[in-house]
Image (tube, rainbow, N blue to C red):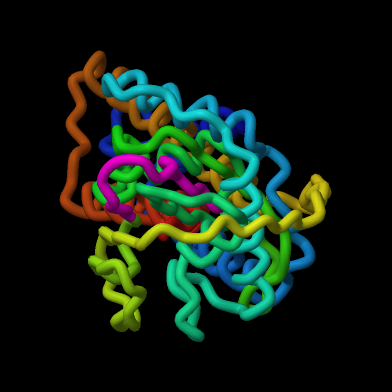
Amino acid sequence: MSFLSNFLPVKNSRKRAKAISQPALFGYIFFLVALIATTSVVKIKLPGILGYASNINTSDLLKFTNEKRAQNGVKEVVLNDTLSKAAEAKAKYMFEHNFWAHVAPDGTEPWDFIIGSGYDYMYAGENLAKDFQTSQGVIDAWMGSPSHKENLLNSNYDDIGFATVNGTLSGYETTLVVQMFGRKRGASQVAAIPEVAAVEVKPQEVVETPAPVEEPIALVLPPQEEITTTPEEEEIPITLPAFDIYSFSKTISFVLALFVAGLFALDGYLASKRNEFRLSGHTFAHVAMLIAALIGVWYVSVGTIL
């Protein structure tokens, strides 16, 4: 029996090719489940093998952000160095204090970094992302979330700042992306942030901020004295991952999906020419499980937004 016979249905038989038989489909499912488990374990137990994202940069983040705004009829935002410094300070603060949230455990809010950088805002907002490998992936994830999309397409913003900072969070190496929006004070006084911060309106005197709530935020602040701080510029090193397990997992699952789909298409074509019928409940069940496992691989490989 030749090697190719494993990929061709048996003539004059209701049997499929060995490569898409029920035992083979079960084997593919087992392989994908093992791949999901390996990806999760490596992410936590062997962070050094993953390294940092090398394909995320400010120019692309700005480009893709403005593309999305233009597509939705919203004016472009301009890169602002002061907001970028605020974003970098926020990212470093998350690493230093080992948290992943809009509001720090000690109560420090995004606005504290914006004001501390010297940006006196009328409107302000923040989006966060981690564990992504590309700038496009970050923007697509934000656009896929209603609250983040609303923030990204908010017409009240004139300026934007980005920070892409490498570090260790909760025991594993990752790249944090901080996106901060703003409009300098001059008219009304409101600010917004997606998903995990408090909703608050402040009068002319600063009052105690209530506990954070996981939903978009609106905020008003009194005029602030301009703070002139000049944090040192730091070049974020671009480090290639020792092994990009996320891309590897996606590639393997994609190739496997094409392989199995191709074999089923070939089997169906030959069966129709031979007037053979091979559908069964077991086959549908195994294919459904295989699809679920493929989706699982892609889900595990996706980053997180906040």
Q: Residue 116: where, in percent of width, then height?
A: 59, 62
Say how many tags the image has. Answer: 0
Give 16 or 134, whichever is nearer the viewer: 134
Looking at the image, which residue is at 16% across and 51% down? 281
Looking at the image, residue 76 sits to the left or right of residue 216; the answer is right
Is residue 165 visible to the viewer in this orientation of the structure?
yes
> Image quarter for residue 187?
top left
Q: Nearer the viewer, residue 95 or 39?
A: 95
Image-quadrant location for residue 140? top left
Residue 126 screen position, x and y as percent:
43, 53
Q: Is residue 199 left or right of residue 184?
A: left
Whole-percent x, y for residue 44 in the image: 63, 74
Q: How far across and how far down the image is residue 288, in percent? A: 26, 51
Per the picture, the main secondary structure of the magenta-coloured stretch is strand
- The N terminus: image quadrant: top right
Quick one: quadrant of the C terminus?
Answer: bottom left
> Residue at the location (22% across, 19% down)?
272
Residue that appears at 61% across and 73% down: 41
Q: Which region is colored magenta? A: 178-192
